Image: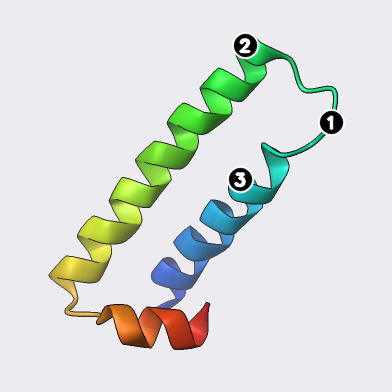
Amino acid sequence: MGTYYRKLQTVKHALQYYITRPNANEKDLAREKNLLKQVEEEVEIFRERNHISKKEVEIND
């Protein structure tokens, strides 16, 4: 898998972790969840365009 895809996956996982932090205000969480959704969509589009199977993703996650 390419470097770009790995970067997207890293950002996705970092956001998933970050939004679980304590004391986050609702406004920030809303923005971060929207960004996470955008990143997840971009990951999915990239995965489909480059014929990366879900099995391959699970192995490398």
The numbered mark, 1 or 3, whose residue comes first in the sequence reads: 3
Measured as percent of width and height from the top left, residue 9 is found at 49, 63
- Indicate the secondary structure of the residue bearing disc 2: helix
Q: At x 48% / y 40%, what residue is drawn?
A: 36
On screen, residue 26 versus residue 36, left or right, reads right
* Residue at the outermost right position: 23
- Residue flagged by tag 3: what amino acid is it? Leu
Residue under circle 1?
22
Vertical arrangement, residue 44 with respect to residue 16, above or below: below
Vertical arrangement, residue 53 with respect to residue 32, above or below: below
Residue under circle 2?
27
Vertical arrangement, residue 46 with respect to residue 50, above or below: above
On screen, residue 51 versus residue 34, left or right, reads left
Tell me whether the residue at label 2 lies in contact with that at label 1, contact meaning CB atoms closer than 8 angstroms.
no
Vertical arrangement, residue 56 with respect to residue 47, above or below: below
> Does residue 54 appear anywhere in the picture?
yes
Instruction: Classify 10 Å Cα crowding around label 3: few (below 14), some (14-19), many (20 and above).
Output: some
Work out how far the residue at label 1 is from the one at label 3, CA to CA, in angstroms: 14 Å
Residue under circle 3?
15
- Residue flagged by tag 2: what amino acid is it? Lys
Q: At x 40% / y 69%, what residue is drawn?
A: 5
> Does residue 1 appear anywhere in the picture?
no
The numbered mark, 2 or 1, whose residue comes first in the sequence reads: 1
On screen, residue 23 versus residue 55, left or right, reads right
Instruction: State which quarter of the image contains the N terminus.
Output: bottom left
Instruction: Classify 10 Å Cα crowding around label 2: few (below 14), some (14-19), many (20 and above).
Output: few
